[in-house]
Amino acid sequence: MHKILYFKSKTCNWCPFVESILKKIVSEKSTLELEVIDIEENYEIAEKYNIIAVPTIILPNSTKIVGATDETFLRQQLSFFL
């Protein structure tokens, strides 16, 4: 099982869009797990991973994707884990 960390906030306009894409991809693959972390509620975790902007995705290989992205790009980045 490969875990994807997804950092978001309630005030982020792009976060719901990116989260829906991630949930769609994860639901299709039993090898992936998504952990959604609200940086306002879990500041310590965000600090631990040095999150300075949202949305931020941390892939299983520790690659960080910062900012809004589309489904094609995310599938490409996750292809190794699918």
Image: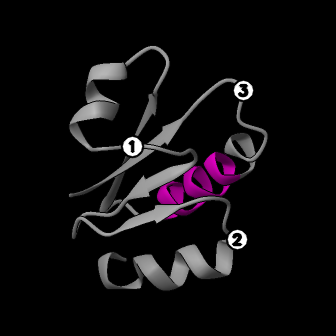
2 with respect to 82 (left or right) = left
Q: Which residues are magenta?
A: 18-28
Please report whichever mark, 3 or 2, sits nearer to the chain's N-terminal start.
3
Q: Nearer the viewer, residue 51 or 31?
A: 51
Q: Nearer the viewer, residue 74 or 81?
A: 74
Name the chief secondary structure element in magenta: helix
- Where does label 1 land, which residue? 51
Residue 19 magenta-highlighted: yes
Which labelled disc corresponds to residue 37?
none
Please report whichever mark, 3 or 1, sits nearer to the chain's N-terminal start.
3
Using a 10 Å C-alpha cutoff, classify the residue at mark 1 as few (fewer than 14 neighbours), some (14 to 19) or many (20 or more): some
Q: Quadrant of residue 73?
A: bottom right
- Where does label 3 land, which residue? 11
- Where does label 2 land, which residue? 70
Q: Assign a secondary structure to mark 2.
A: loop
x then y, percent, for residue 60: 25, 63
- Amino acid type at image mark 2: Asp
Give the distance between the C-alpha atoms of the residues marked 3 and 1, in whole angstroms: 15 Å
